[in-house]
Amino acid sequence: MIEVPYYNETGERLGSVQLDEAKLGGEVRPALLKQAFVRGHANRRSINSPTKSRADVQGSTRKLYKQKGTGNARRGDKKANLLRGGGSAKAKIKHDWRQEMPRKMRRLANRNALLAKAVDGEIKLVDVPASGAPSTKSFIALMEALGVDRTCLVALADTRTVEAKSARNIPGVTVTQSEQLDVFELLNHRYLVMHKDAFEAYLAKFVNDEKPATSKTDKLVEGLDARTHSFSSQTTEAA
């Protein structure tokens, strides 16, 4: 079990939250995290707009004028890149940079990134009551009290709250919803700042998502037992 401490607005430690590393993959897996991070970076890359080459432009391939005797430079058809309406000399080809990853690997990578943050002590939990009005100055003071001196990911249950408005104008701080935490955002920031209640709710989702692993053989055996019990009951009633 890993203890993740939580603090008040002055940086005083109030307690800790128990984090079961077995629920987050058991150990940090660098190869999986790198693959998931590269995938997240590639999926955010925009698809380039293709341009037409000389072969893609529609038009006649007739030579504009004869090769010699005119005094002009040599010229081919009207689709040359030097002429207006011609093709591009180095045309861009449409390319999709997206990468695929199995669903189980994606979920494990998200949990493992959270485990890596917990092992390095880069998760800062707070138990601070909501303020009345947005204040960037007070939020900066909270970050200084927590010892946040690098990039920070602030995960909130609702991004329309006062805390979100207070943090959205600070350089190096990204506000996101706690339910949308992913491996790319976690690894792209040094610290993770969350409210204690939101963090516990996020961990509880892992427990609720777990389902007992039953093989096909177990299911067949269960079905066979059920049919045998039903047949025995009917035989007993007939007798």
Image: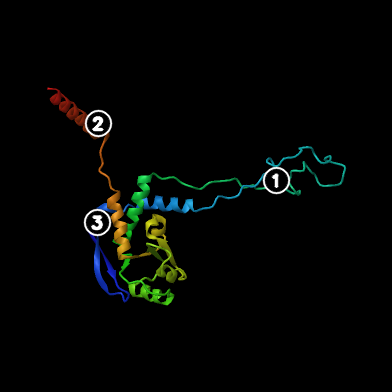
To which residue does mark 1 refer? 87
Q: Amino acid at mark 1?
A: Gly
Residue 93 x, y percent position in the rendering = 60, 45
Residue 118 x, y percent position in the rendering = 30, 61
Mark number, residue 220: 2
To which residue does mark 3 refer? 20
Q: Are marks 2 and 1 in contact (CB under 8 Å)?
A: no
Residue 134 x, y percent position in the rendering = 43, 73
Q: Amino acid at mark 3?
A: Asp
- Quadrant of residue 15 in the image? bottom left
Which of label 1 and label 3 is nearer to you? 3
N-terminal-most mark, 1 or 3: 3
Residue 49 x, y percent position in the rendering = 60, 49
Q: Residue furthest front?
A: 238
Query: Mark 2: which secondary structure?
Result: helix
Which of label 2 and label 3 is nearer to you? 2
